[in-house]
Amino acid sequence: MRFFSDNAAAAHPKVLEAIAAANPLDTAYDGDALSQRLDGAFSDLFETEVRALWVTTGTAANCLALAALCPPYGAIICHRDAHIEVDEAGAPGFFTAGAKLILLEGKGAKVSPDAVTAACDRIRKDVHQVQPAAISITNATEYGLVYRAAEVAALGEIARERGLAFHMDGARFANALATTGESPADVTWRAGVDALSFGFVKNGGLNAEALILFRTELFDEVAVRRKRAGHLLSKGRYLAAQILALLEGDLWLDNARAANAAAQTLAQSAPSRLVYPVEANEIFLQASADEAERLRGQGFDFYDWGPGEIRLVTSWDQQGQEIERLAGAITALDAA
Amino acid sequence: MRFFSDNAAAAHPKVLEAIAAANPLDTAYDGDALSQRLDGAFSDLFETEVRALWVTTGTAANCLALAALCPPYGAIICHRDAHIEVDEAGAPGFFTAGAKLILLEGKGAKVSPDAVTAACDRIRKDVHQVQPAAISITNATEYGLVYRAAEVAALGEIARERGLAFHMDGARFANALATTGESPADVTWRAGVDALSFGFVKNGGLNAEALILFRTELFDEVAVRRKRAGHLLSKGRYLAAQILALLEGDLWLDNARAANAAAQTLAQSAPSRLVYPVEANEIFLQASADEAERLRGQGFDFYDWGPGEIRLVTSWDQQGQEIERLAGAITALDAA
Amino acid sequence: MRFFSDNAAAAHPKVLEAIAAANPLDTAYDGDALSQRLDGAFSDLFETEVRALWVTTGTAANCLALAALCPPYGAIICHRDAHIEVDEAGAPGFFTAGAKLILLEGKGAKVSPDAVTAACDRIRKDVHQVQPAAISITNATEYGLVYRAAEVAALGEIARERGLAFHMDGARFANALATTGESPADVTWRAGVDALSFGFVKNGGLNAEALILFRTELFDEVAVRRKRAGHLLSKGRYLAAQILALLEGDLWLDNARAANAAAQTLAQSAPSRLVYPVEANEIFLQASADEAERLRGQGFDFYDWGPGEIRLVTSWDQQGQEIERLAGAITALDAA
Amino acid sequence: MRFFSDNAAAAHPKVLEAIAAANPLDTAYDGDALSQRLDGAFSDLFETEVRALWVTTGTAANCLALAALCPPYGAIICHRDAHIEVDEAGAPGFFTAGAKLILLEGKGAKVSPDAVTAACDRIRKDVHQVQPAAISITNATEYGLVYRAAEVAALGEIARERGLAFHMDGARFANALATTGESPADVTWRAGVDALSFGFVKNGGLNAEALILFRTELFDEVAVRRKRAGHLLSKGRYLAAQILALLEGDLWLDNARAANAAAQTLAQSAPSRLVYPVEANEIFLQASADEAERLRGQGFDFYDWGPGEIRLVTSWDQQGQEIERLAGAITALDAA
């Protein structure tokens, strides 16, 4: 059973239906009726005028945004464990033509205002050192922690003061909001965020993510960069259809709530083993190599995460029996 | 009725079925069983060992290949009307980190051995001038002309002599082979081609293209570049499923034959108006602005292509009545 | 005797003196007193406030300017024979991170307003085609023709209307002005030029060129790009010293006048052989391979320039006897 | 008095003489007799066949080498305080088209074999993480520490085992060798170094550095990259002349010995304040803000280096009285 990541979960049936329903449409790129509805749908969701572009990966969403927010000779401040640093094969360097990542420490991959300030202050203001141009945070973080709106706003305030752009990698944005119940607007543009990678693939989508631009004037540049990076699909309607299906009736939130609930069940099976509080759909547990082996022996698939730790990730389609079995197996470790 | 491009045609029902069938699979990236079958399937088709990667656009396939075949300080020789020059927003420059395109003239976007030789000979062999590193041709060409295996081999011979890599943009590779009946192997690696962008999206696919590497040692680099460009989808199985569905029972060839047949019907409706021989699924016709207007008035949608010319493109799903109506409307232009 | 280029001529004695005089200074980069004088010296020369940066090559000056004027996804319109296209090893692609050059035809490497307009009009305004962002012209051109202020202004007007930046490669700017007698201001910013590569190396300098920014707000970005490209020398004072020595008492104009006068002497030796009017210090002559051989046999060194043509370039330090001998040798060809 | 860096010291009189002597030469780029002598001169010095290229800055030497040694999708392992990370404005990212720097800790900016091994081991061998391609060390380090040949060889061994290229930034290579007395060969290619940035500017040069390629097959690529980066000066003879003058009679070693001796004098004036052992020409001292102020009040110019530390750098032209005065002033601090 898959607990190694939510990135391979099934697509939601409504997503598959929406794809099939989009088949008769025949306008290319993003000229079709579905793609044209995205700006409106996201503007409604975010309670302000936004521009939205579909892409097929979070890496594309992140790096197209960063390329528009940071010049080749600038730097992006992010956490040492950020996906853009650790798991995108250097894509930020590729899309920005060589911008630098400045890596912060911080528990649970969370970026603190103090860490940002200290990183900025360490840099001499001259042409010899790369000057920061943007901040990027991940919400929920790579360790499943969630930023509240006020926390984002504190970073947004620093960004504003220092003239830095502000990007949020929301590969698990839905899981974060499902936990806090805060509004999409409060956690993003009202808190100073300029661009959001809004993840759908891990949350019931098939292969569509959305890049949301709160600074709408960036749209033209990002649209060109999307094409130039080979990310303007000719049959974009199939991507728009997925996103609209997930937005419809807040299916995206329902899916995230289901994944989060499953995570809570697992968390409660081993409270003393938790490495981080479980705030979204990722659970990091202390577990010896032997214990990990025992779980694997029962058919559970997951990653080791450093020595003595394992990572479990739940997804929208994992509920009931499967979760109960894993929870039971974890509980049983203590008995052993 | 859509005749502006085959890039917005419907996905074939079998493709949709294959996507639905892939849903239960849950391995990420290209580790799933379907993705793992691609190398074998294409090796069978090409009668030699190849490596195959799915991507979502022809631009991505073309430019990932070119980045592996041409250093940043090299040049790619192609036709002035090549898609990589005209319609990819400068993607080759982005993926290669600044390589140059050397543009050739040639009727119908076809690259001739003489033109390649002359272009190479014009370049001084010193550090001041950008040295050619690769040739890229499009088959079928942007004007619907087809290279026979012998023609490709003549270019392949020059490539070999000059130490140039050789790439084929096969966005309409299926249409080319449907016309010539030649084998995939003869038109590619046996003729010296190193990498092929094998198009499926215009030919019944939904959003999957294949990049075929005949020089299999390039795979590792291309795989990294794919990830780095944000083109490694986490649920790659849905792309592999599409490609395998189209390979199954030569559906790709059937689709291309249908599109080509439709094109022949249109061509025969106006033989005296043809700007180029119709060898695939594109028809370029002489037509005045008035005549174009008249066709549009009857519901046909297509591009003007320079003054006094129009372009019609047929697709796998256009047959019977729709084509007959357009053929009739074209014939009627002469009567007017 | 060197007539292959002015790029290897001696440095003027005053330049060597200035270098020696700069030796005791000991402030690094461009913080020294000489470097700090450049802005003022060029602001005086151009009758407006400019920012000036020393670099060591024309390629660096050109491409730093272009990188600031054209985004990676934009295009630079220039002549097919422009130095940036033909003789800089693709440096524009490197510095801009992949921008494209759009190449114009035109007699003597001269860019005409009509050619620029036609090139712009050919481009569809969509994300598929690379949009022009800048024009670059060379003055004097690669064939020794000179733009008058009015000609530059006509191009500047198009640039303004189309929202294009405007760069002038002035590797032989001195030679151009020495011919026309026009003011530096009239041929540049008053005609709409945003940035000028002001050449000194071919005109008595040792290894210093100047990049002049008429849009002074570009300075900070260009200064960072200069550092990032490895072009911020730690002992910049030796470059500033050269430039100031050449500006002093209009030595740069005197040098250019000397080179131009030498060119006129040669031109008059063979008026019927001239391929282009001689307006600066380059002379293109019709000469058979035999005739070229004969000249070489007498110790004259120069380039063949296509079949049946040769190029001669004069420099500030070539006067009197040497020029007379070559003029005589050319005249004698007719007698042969 | 300048103690802030050796990068602004005077050029040695013999260097100025050599430049003047090169004036009559008139061959462009690196075709002149002096430039052509570099390969031989450095091959003699390094007791093996090498290729050598002049450039004007250490940043250019470093980054041209790194671009040839590391692909855009690779990483360069270096110290957190390495010049390429801290003081080159992101030039490695620019020259390599986006390669990443992996930063190591280590006292005095020294890279240890264990740190390299640990950094490599932390990286998963998949396409998601950037794989290391090269190691770069600085010798003498940014804190004036020196690698012995055996230390370099230990790193070279790891590089060999892991398939990593090995670059040495030798901005103060002369100072390092002047201290150890080891041979240039032992500290470089015999220890596994592939390319060396051999600094001359800080050591009596005017504006010439050398890039030494021990893997001679890299020459062609590096030569093209040099041109493409605007670093192929047309009058290269003036650079070659400087380098040859400094090689002549081991003037480069004499200069370095003089600077090192001055550093020792200063070090002995305050042994208890030394932050690092003084092994080359840089002295890091503990000094309060008050003490620093007191030194500045006596006319000494230097950098603060973090709280409570200052950096002094000596150069070839600083001897005798000037050094004695500063040494005295430092000693006097303790008395105060």
Image (cartoon, coloured by chain):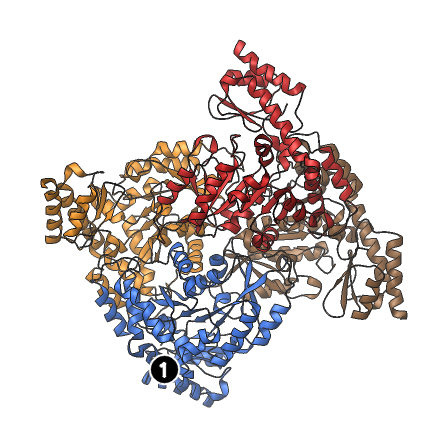
Chain colours: A orange, B blue, C brown, D red
From the viewer's side, name the closer residue of A274 and C249.
Answer: A274
Q: Which residue is mark 1?
A: B257
Quadrant assignment for the N terminus of chain D: top right
Q: Is residue C69 above or below residue D289?
A: below
* Residue A259 seen from this side: yes
Which residue lies at the image location 63% right of the left edge and 48% below the top edge? D53
**Could you say whether the residue bearing mark 1 is in a helix, strand or loop?**
helix
Does A176 sit above or below residue B140? above
> Does C116 sit left or right of C143 as displayed?
left
x and y, in percent, of residue A59 in the image: 36, 52
Q: Label 1 marks which chain's residue?
A: B
Q: Quadrant of residue D158 in the image?
A: top left
Under mark 1, the amino acid is Arg
Nearer to me, D208 or C151: D208
State left or right for residue D249 relative to residue B166: right
Name the spot of residue D183 as percent of width and height, x first.
59, 38
Q: Residue at x 11, y 52 (%)?
A: A320
Indicate the position of residue A31 as horizontal and vertical percent values: 37, 64
- Where residue A95 appears, as percent x and y from the top left, is 44, 52
**Numbered-mark total:** 1
* Left or right of residue B263: residue C303: right
The residue depicted at 29 percent of the width and 74 percent of the height is B12
